[in-house]
Image (tube, rainbow, N blue to C red):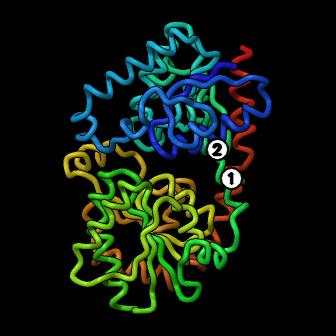
Amino acid sequence: MRLGLLAGEMSGDILGAAVVAALSERVHELELTGIGGPRLTALGLESLYPMDRLSVMGLIDPLKRLPELLAIRRGVYRQQIAWQPDVFLGIDSPDFNLTLERRLRARGLRTAHLVSPSVWAWRAGRLKGIGKAIDLMMCLLPFEVAIYEKAGIPAVCVGHPLIEELQDLPSSVDMRQQLGLPRDGRLVAVLPGSRAGEVTSLMPVFAQTVAELSRLDATLKFVIPAANSARAQQIQRFLADRPSPLPVTVLEGMGRQAMHAADVVLLASGTATLEAMLLRKPMVIAYRMAALSWHVLSRLATTPFAGLPNILAGREVVPELLQDNANVASLVPAMIDCLEHGAAIQVSQFDELAEAIGGGFGERCADALAGLKAR
């Protein structure tokens, strides 16, 4: 089987790797081309371009990089048309992938998209364009399927790989030992995002929040897992600006492990909120972006929530502090409450939400792609 695929950021690389691993077990010979990160590369993908060149956020950053992004998309399009995959799979990154998928489908290629755009949250009018771009939408969340079926777009729920992956982790105590973190006392994991822009927006207020929490309770310890070495250096620069050292350990990678080791989590909205939920970790969600991007995007939103646990539940299970509300005066009391009462209030609701998503992600994806190839 020839599979073209494009993962534009780290979360897409993780999902794509789970799909490819499952396909490899049932397909005699699996050939891959496209764009991906380290996990897909380890499974045999020779990425046409570095994946991090596609990792942009908001509205302003993509505009600044538009010529480069368009050139990459043209390059992938030409390569895929020449190579003629059995299926082309776009993984997340909808603004980039859906246009590419539409052009490929117009040339007769079968196209699938993994991870539904948030059509239930904003820009529902995208459904018409999505229908022209794909032969199959592979949804991670069960309620999304009905939205696509109502619009006449084939869709299937494939669950989420984290359901199985997180079951293999050691105990939280053992994880602390593996990471070189204090075995005793309360530990807070702080995740300011995987993109440079996210870290720039969130890390100053997160550092201030850590400083104030540490002042109020000197026994608290903190761990910040950086997405990569560049983000680790960026985070260290923000920490170095503090007038006195903070009780913080910065790790490179290890986001999942750091959350598992921690008692509570302070994090940016995004895929990590789902991961924290499946790890049964109480959390506070925060997010900030460029003022102009927020001005536009907040007016397009059709859901009151940003964090996946709240979106799944349809109510605020987890505190969300967004944009101007993501400040020290709000974050500190929210984190104190999370430390004291989060386990009782939040975690009791996480089991039900996890069951609704379901497991078997890789196998369900492989079934969907094999069925699409056979059409």
Percent coordinates x, y for residue 6 in the rendering:
50, 30
Numbered tag placed on residue 356 in the rendering = 1
47 to 102, vertically: above or below: below
- Closer to the camera in the image, 116 or 17: 17
Numbered tag placed on residue 228 in the rendering = none
Q: How far apart, in angstroms, are the residues tagged by discs 2 and 1?
A: 7 Å
Q: Judging from the image, what secondary structure is the residue with disc 2 in?
A: helix
Residue at x 56%, y 61% (from the top left corner): 256
Percent coordinates x, y for residue 322 in the rendering:
33, 61
Residue kind at label 2, given as amino acid type:
Pro
Q: Judging from the image, what secondary structure is the residue with disc 1 in?
A: helix
Residue at x 71%, y 50% (from the top left corner): 358
| Residue 195 falls left or right of residue 9 | left
| Residue 25 falls left or right of residue 34 | right
Does residue 153 show up? no
Q: Residues within 10 Å of mark 2 (few under 14, many from 20)?
A: some
Among the two numbered marks 2 and 1 on one chain, the one whose residue lies closer to the N terminus: 2
Percent coordinates x, y for residue 86 in the rendering:
64, 16
Q: Residues within 10 Å of mark 1 (few under 14, many from 20)?
A: some
The quadrant where residue 234 appears: bottom left
- Closer to the camera in the image, 218 or 140: 218
Is the Cβ of the residue at disc 2 closer than 8 Å to that at disc 1? Answer: yes
Residue kind at label 1, given as amino acid type:
Ala
The quadrant where residue 362 appears: top right
Percent coordinates x, y for residue 321 in the rendering:
36, 66
The quadrant where residue 344 appears: bottom right
Numbered tag placed on residue 142 in the rendering = 2
- Closer to the camera in the image, 88 or 114: 88
37 to 128, vertically: above or below: below
Does residue 280 show up? yes
| Residue 270 falls left or right of residue 371 | left
372 to 305, vertically: above or below: above
